[in-house]
Image (spheres, rainbow, N blue to C red):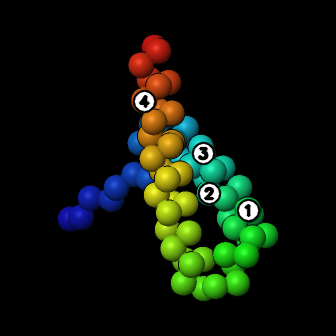
Amino acid sequence: MSKRRKVIRDSNHLFQLVISAAIIFSGITLLRNSEIAASTPLYFLALAILFGSAWFIARLLLNVVTRRK
């Protein structure tokens, strides 16, 4: 039997997902309106950096929020 992983583990993880999704959505909107979108390799590189940095920022915010409790 295989065990299925839960996508959302708890409310803190949900907070992290929402924050990273908001950063990614706003970043994609900014990238779409820039000159980087004209070059496909640069666009994909910018998207990869955006996804990584959004997840990192969300992790930092989550650590700050959980320390205050």
Front position in the image: 34 or 19: 34
Front position in the image: 6 or 31: 31
What type is the residue that disc 4 sits on?
Asn
Q: Position of residue 49 (x, y in %)?
A: 50, 63
When the figure is inspected, residue 41 is found, relative to residue 20, above or below; the finding is below
Q: What separation in Å lies between label 1 and label 2 (alpha carbons)?
A: 10 Å
Q: Secondary structure at mark 1?
A: helix
Identify the residue at image location x=64%, y=85%: 39
Residue occupying the far top of the picture: 69
Instruction: Look at the image and tell me in which quarter the C terminus lies.
Output: top left
Q: Which mark is nearer the camera, 3 or 2?
A: 2
Residue 49 seen in the current view: yes
Dot 1 corresponds to which residue? 30
Q: Quadrant of residue 31?
A: bottom right
Q: In the rendered structure, find residue 18 and report the number of the disc placed on it.
A: 3
Q: Which mark is nearer the camera, 1 or 2?
A: 1
Q: Earlier in the sequence, mark 4 or mark 1?
A: 1
Judged left or right of residue 18, residue 7 is left
Dot 2 corresponds to which residue? 24
Q: Which mark is nearer the camera, 3 or 4?
A: 4
Q: What separation in Å lies between label 4 and label 2 (alpha carbons)?
A: 19 Å
Q: Secondary structure at mark 3?
A: helix
Q: Position of residue 16 (x, y in %)?
A: 51, 42
Q: In the rendered structure, find residue 20 and report the number of the disc placed on it.
A: none
